[in-house]
Amino acid sequence: MVWREFVLGRNPSLPERVQVFDTTLRDGEQSPGVALRVEEKLRIAEALADLGVAVIEAGYPAVSRGEMEAVRSIARLGLPSKICALSRCEKGDIDRAVDAGVDWVHVFIATSELHMKYKLRMTPDEVYSRAVEMVEYAKSRGVTVHFSCEDATRSERKFLLKVYRGAAEAGADSVDIPDTVGVAIPEVMKELVREVKGVTGLPVAVHCHDDMGLATANTLAGVEGGAEIVHVTVNGIGERAGNTSLEEVVLALETLYGVKTGIRLEKLASVSRLVSRLTGMVVQKNKAVVGDNAFSHESGIHVHGVINNPATYEPVMPEVVGKRRRIVLGKHSGTHAVLEVLKQHGFNLSHEETRRVLERVKELGDMGMRVTEELLLRDVIGVLDGSKPSISVESISYAKDGETFACSLVLNVRGERMESRGIGRSTVSASIDAMRRAVSALVGDVRLEDLALYVPPDPDRYPAEAEVVVVVNSKTLTGRGLAHDPGLAVAMAVAGAVSQALSVEARG
Ligand code: MN
C-alpha cells in the first residue's frame, strides 16, 4: 500500500528520501527518570548506527562533565552515522560541543514571546543578532551547523522566518522546526516547512513532541511539506509525552509514502528492546510497530485469517520489523489458534483431537477462566489419548563445577529414551548445549536463530516462558516452552520446534 503518487499529486515537494536524525541519547535521555551511563550510551549509539540512522544526536555537552565525556566517546567510535551535539547560542557551549569532536553542532535559541520574555529575558532583536552571530561562530569552528528556533510553532511567524533567514545567511547547513511542546497540527507543520524552505533554501528538519498524540502525524505532514530530515527517538521516549517515535515514522515513510529512510527495518524490534531495557522505559503493549501486541492475534476470525494468509489482518509481516507473530489464547479463540499454539509445543493433532481440546478450552472459557498456555498444557491436553510431541523432555538436572554448569537431559524421542549432556556458563546455556547435541543427532543441521526468555518476578508461582526460533535444515520453526526452571523452558521450546520438523518428515 504505497500512497506515493496520491501524496505527490497534492504535495509535489515530497522528498524521495529523508535523513533520520535520532535524538534518543539527547531528548530521549531527558525523559523524566532516565539517566544513562556512558557504556550504555555507547551501546545505544552503536545500535543506532547499525540500524542506519544518518545523524545521532549524542548529547548536550554543556550539561555536565559526564555528558561531555559521553559525547566525546561516541564521537571517537568512528561510526558510519554523523555525530551531533546540542548547544545553546553561546560561545562556551559551542566550544564544548566542537571540542567533543562531533561532526554536527545543533545550535538552538528560543523565538516565542513566552520563551524570550520569561526564559531568555532577551528582546527579539537581541535573539536575532545572537542567533546570527552564533551560527557564524559555529561555522568558523569547522562543523556542520544545524539550527533550531526553539518553540517555533508558538513563535510569531514573521519574526520566526526572519531568524531562519538570518541563520541561513550566516551559513547554517540545515535548519530544524521544533514543535517544542507538541501543539502543532499536521496542516500547520506542512505549511511551516514550506515557508522555512522558501526563506532559507536549506534542508529542513521537523522535531515534534507527542503531547497531543500528534507527533507522528505532524512529522509526516512536515515530510509532505518537503522536510528532508526527521528528528525521532526510539520508542518515542523524550520529555513529557515524548518525541516522535522512530519506528512509527520510518515504517510509515517506507511502506505508506514510498520515501526511503536508510533504516534497516528488520533491526527495529531489537533496537527498541535495547533502549527499553537500558532506559527502564517500558514499551506499552499496544504500541505501534514494536509493542508486544503489535503482531498478536486472539479472536478466532483473525487467527483463522492470519494463519491462512497473514495479510488479512497484518499491514506488514512481523519479520519486516524484526518481530514475530504471536497467537494468544483467550475466550475468542477458535480451532486454528489452539492448533497453532500446540504446534509450537510440538503437538501434531488430528481433527478429532483438536475438536476435543477446543471443547475443553470453551468449557473453561464459559467458567470464566483465562486459558493460559500453562493451563492448556497442564489440563486441557489431558483430553488427548496420550498423543505426545515427537520429542519431549522427561527430566533435566544440573551440576556445577567452578564457573561451569553441566546439564543432563533425558528426552523421549518417539517413545525411546535418549540422554544428552551439555555445558555452559549458566544453566540455560548448558541446557541449550545439551539440547543442540541431542537434536543435531536426530535431524541434522540445526541452528538456534533467536531466543526470548521471560522469567516472571514470582518464578516459584509462575513458570518461565521461552520462545525460540530454530532453523532445521533451512526451515524456520518457532517453539515455545513453559517451566519453572528457565533451562527446562528453553529445552522444551527447542523440543517443540524440532518436533514440528520431525512430524513434517514423518508425513512425508
Ligand atoms: Mn525536544
Image (cartoon, rainbow, N blue to C red):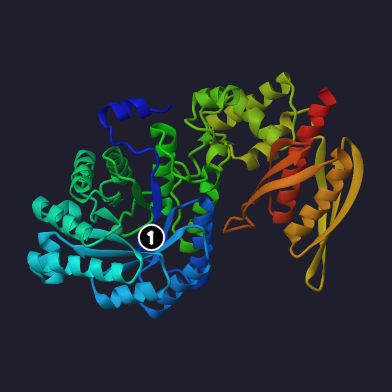
Amino acid type at image mark 1: Gly
104 relative position to 277: left or right: left
Going 53% across and 29% down the picture, which residue do you hit? 366
Residue linked to disc 1: 28
Q: Nearer the viewer, residue 319 or 327?
A: 319
Image quarter hosting the N terminus: top left
Task: Tell me the element at label 1.
Answer: helix
Identify the residue at horizontal 51%, vertical 43% (top origin). 265
Residue 468 in which image quadrant: top right
Image coordinates of residue 240 in percent, x first then y, are 30, 58
Screen quadrant of the C terminus:
top right
Quadrant of ligand 1: it is bottom left
218 to 166, vertically: above or below: above
Q: Nearer the viewer, residue 86 or 168?
A: 168
**Left or right: 343, with 196 as reference point:** right
Q: Is residue 287 visible?
A: no
Looking at the picture, does residue 270 appear above or below residue 256? below
Mark yes or no: residue 161 visible.
yes
Residue at 85% across, 38% down: 443
Image coordinates for residue 206, horizontal then vertical, percent: 29, 50
Q: Position of residue 123 (x, y in %)?
A: 7, 68
| Residue 457 against residue 73 in the figure, above or below | above
Most foreground residue, 208 or 170: 170
**In the picture shown, does residue 366 fall above or below 434?**
above
